[in-house]
Image (tube, rainbow, N blue to C red):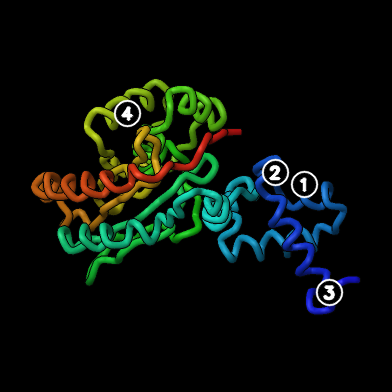
Amino acid sequence: MSNPGINKATLRTLEVLSSCETRELPFGVSDLSRTDGITKNMAFRILQTLAEHGYLVRDSETQKYDLGPQILWLAREGLSEDFDIIKFSSPYLRQLHELTGESIFLSIIVGRNHLTIDGVEAHGVRVSHQPRGLLVPLHASPASRVLLAHLSDTQIEDYIAAASPLKRFTPTTITDPDKLRREVALVREQGFARGYGDHYQHGNYISFPVLDSTGRPHAAITIGGPPNRFTLERIEELLPSMLAVIREMNTHSQRFPAPGQIVFR
């Protein structure tokens, strides 16, 4: 006997949610309509509802949906130690904000992209930044590049193959695979990624990885500010102190496993 407290639309949404991790990703309205035998209008409403609540994210270019942060956190419930990256990172984000006075962003890998899921805003004049929920490809922006650099060489090659031709956002976006490989080597060597204005040009940025004990990335932390205040000279001056905070953070983040095998399609 059906539960009168749950309508058909809600039940359909829950069914789609429960099957998201076993579906071929990314998928769109037509894909969901075809596989689940529902109308495109209903499929659109279901996907929009799940995206609004963070269970899915939509690629603005392809209009297809991939797993969002809420599903990724639900998937971690089976671990022996529950690890909430937002809760874990919060005191370090605030420490970096107090140190620099600038905006701090926390990002994770979702599909072929990074997604900003938390942050602390600077007071007064601040950098404009992409809204939470927007997917940024892993070759564009320092947050993306610092995450990409801490994947395995095989995963990096898989990303390049899946994302090619690499999309250009600004004149400084790295779109040449060999140049991207050299950038990966540089990020690994220095332990951070500098902003080149390769995704958003109106600010100076620097990003650091949050890693597990095997060197896989949990997340990226990015500090950004207006170029007339967060100057390249100020970044260099603050770099030792910022690195000290990140090293302390990574000492504790290594106790928790990062998300498992990442597959690029």
Q: Give, as a three-letter code, the residue at label 3.
A: Asn
Judging by the rendered image, the residue that carries numbered circle 1 is 31
Corner quadrant of residue 217: top left
Q: Confirm or deny contact between disc 2 and disc 1 (CB under 8 A).
A: no
Up-down relation of residue 130 to residue 213 (above or below): below
Which label sits in the foreground, 4 or 2? 2
Judging by the rendered image, the residue that carries numbered circle 4 is 183
In-image side of 145 versus 103 (left or right): right
Judging by the rendered image, the residue that carries numbered circle 3 is 3
Please give the label number shown on residue 206: none
Up-down relation of residue 215 to residue 6 (above or below): above
Which label sits in the foreground, 2 or 1? 2
Q: Give, as a three-letter code, the residue at label 2.
A: Thr
Q: CA distance from mark 1 to mark 4?
A: 36 Å
Q: Which of disc 1 and disc 2 is earlier in sequence?
A: 2
Circle 3: element type: loop
Circle 4: element type: helix
Corner quadrant of residue 236: top left
Q: CA distance from mark 3 to mark 1?
A: 28 Å
Judging by the rendered image, the residue that carries numbered circle 2 is 22
Bin the neighbour count of mark 4 within 10 Å (Cα to Cα): few under 14, some 14-19, many 20 and up: some
Q: CA distance from mark 2 to mark 1?
A: 14 Å
Q: Front-most of 113 and 95?
A: 95
Check the picture and name the quadrant holding the N terminus. bottom right
Q: Which of disc 3 and disc 2 is earlier in sequence?
A: 3
